[in-house]
Amino acid sequence: MSEQLAMVTGASSGIGEAFARELVRRGYAVILVARRLDRLIALQAELGKGTEVLAADLATEEGMGAVAARLSRGGISLLVNNAGLGFRGLVVDQPEASITRLVRVNLEAPMRLSRGAAAQMAGEGRGTLINVASMGAFQPVPYLNVYAATKAGLLSFTEALADEVAGFGVTVQALCPGNIPTGFQDVAGTKGSRFDRTPSMSAGEVARRSLDAALQGGPTLFLPARMDRISIFAQRFLPRFVARRVAGSLLKSE
């Protein structure tokens, strides 16, 4: 088993695909995890030897179990929990099944996979875990309500986990990107909103900066863009209701 073996969830597009490409560029063998097998196979063909495909729907027990089983085999030195989704609109209008799916993919799955990976890595005395949260984790976000709540939970979990495994040679990063142009906007329904016009950077740059920081033992909380760091600093001086209303105004239908 390669000492440079990584796993990326949500690898078929967006930030996950960018992580997969960057890891291969750095010499890692990569296990590509996502729902859409056809996209995984296409990406595997492009990235070449050293990539492995695992089709799994992380909203299901079967999907989570399949990925957890692959982790339990050991040898994975880097895990990127990137899979995620969101739905724009009033929470009262969203079907219960959609909310359940969102919570499972965005919060339950990365928590369970982080636990499994951290146990394996701690036992081996090395490893890197990156959980992709969001700038939406720092305040309530009306019209992207449940998404922001799951990312807040993931941020809290990841920061606490970092302290718990710090003495075992495991580096944990909570990556909090802002608005990054990916397929997320189309699925979430945020395309064309004022949020869609906020400053952003490419998915490739996010992946590169995240890996640079994590592999050098950088901070647990990582904000890849300068504007994101400025935004978080400014929020410390704003009443929470102001931050909440500003966030909601970017997503409210015009």
Image: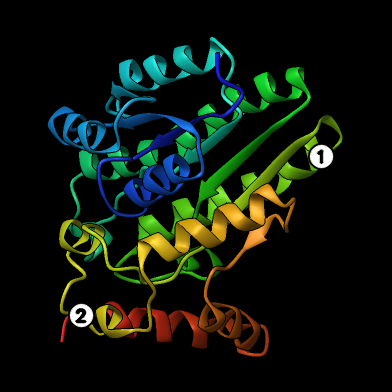
Q: Position of residue 7 (x, y in %)?
A: 46, 31
Quarter of the image where the C terminus is located: bottom left
Q: Quadrant of residue 50?
A: top left
Residue type highlighted by circle 1: Ala
Q: Position of residue 140 (x, y in %)?
A: 47, 69
Is disc 2 placed on a helix, strand or loop? Answer: loop
Count of picture labels: 2
Label 2 neighbour load within 10 Å: few <14, some 14-19, many 20+: some
Q: Position of residue 23 (x, y in %)?
A: 47, 43
| Residue 220: numbered disc | none
Residue type highlighted by circle 2: Ser
Q: Label 2, label 1: how many angstroms apart (C-alpha)?
A: 40 Å
Is disc 1 placed on a helix, strand or loop? Answer: helix
Q: Residue at x 47, y 65 (%)?
A: 177
| Residue 193: numbered disc | 2
| Residue 166: numbered disc | 1
Q: Position of residue 20 (x, y in %)?
A: 39, 42
Q: Residue at x 30, y 23 (%)?
A: 53
Q: Quadrant of residue 195?
A: bottom left
- Residue 143 is left or right of residue 45, and the answer is right
